[in-house]
Image: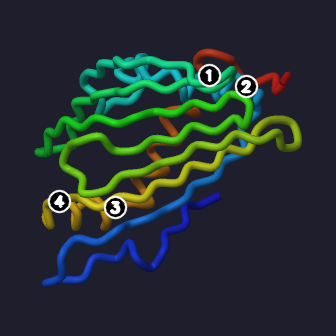
Amino acid sequence: MPARTSPASRPRAGRPPELHSTRVSRELPYSPDDLFRLVGDVDAYPEFVPWVSSLRTWNRTEPEPGVSTLDAEAKVGFAFVRETFATRVRRDANARVIDVSLLHGPFRRLRNRWAFAPSGGGTRIDFEIDFEFKSRLLDAILAANLDRAASKVIGCFEARAHALYGSGTAAA
């Protein structure tokens, strides 16, 4: 399914950066629990997300059974852009949802959500992201490529799932 972008994701010249949003959904032949664990394993991102050059995590907590949080700082690079940003990651295994919110970095706002639901012979993944960069230049560059970038994010995880789980079994 192609990525869908809200009208707010179109930058307008001469205006300050604004909130951009998109949502990408995919059906994959793996179990929701396997995909939840794969996306929730943020320490492994430098192994398979090409633009994440390094990542460190700290402040791990488990506020309730099945729910964990951690803070993560990623160094990322795209073409000529190199940035570092930190997020709080909340993993709710009971609901099969991962929420990510900004702690600090080049964004004015950043939020993303991964949701994993059984579907047919596998799992429906919904990835939503809302962001606004502090820099007008970065904001315009990513906003212009938002659909493609969100699809690439999902593609990295899809390739990793195939590498780890093969062609898929979808056993929950």
How far apart marks 4 and 1 lie (CA) works out to 32 Å
Question: Can you say which quadrant of the picture contains the C terminus?
Answer: top right
Residue beneath the point at 23% across and 58% down: 133
Badge 1: residue crowd in 10 Å (few <14, some 14–19, many ≥20): some
How far apart marks 1 and 2 lie (CA) works out to 6 Å
Per the image, label 1 sits on a secondary structure element best described as: helix
Query: Along the line of sight, which residue is nearer the eye, 28 or 129?
Result: 129
* Circle 2 residue: 33
* Circle 4 residue: 134
Task: Indicate which label's residue lies in the foreground, 3 or 2.
Answer: 2
Tell me if label 4 and label 2 are in contact, CB under 8 Å: no
Q: Amino acid at mark 1?
A: Arg
- Rendered location of residue 20, percent (x, y): 38, 66
- Rendered location of residue 115, percent (x, y): 65, 43
Position of residue 137 relative to residue 36, above or below, is below
For residue 6, which numbered disc appears in the image? Answer: none
From the viewer's perspective, tell me whether residue 147 is left or right of residue 109: right
Tell me if label 1 and label 2 are in contact, CB under 8 Å: yes
Badge 4: residue crowd in 10 Å (few <14, some 14–19, many ≥20): some
Q: Amino acid at mark 4?
A: Lys
How far apart marks 3 and 4 lie (CA) works out to 17 Å
Tell me if label 4 and label 1 are in contact, CB under 8 Å: no
How far apart marks 3 and 2 lie (CA) works out to 30 Å
Tell me if label 3 and label 4 are in contact, CB under 8 Å: no
Position of residue 123 relative to residue 110, above or below, is above
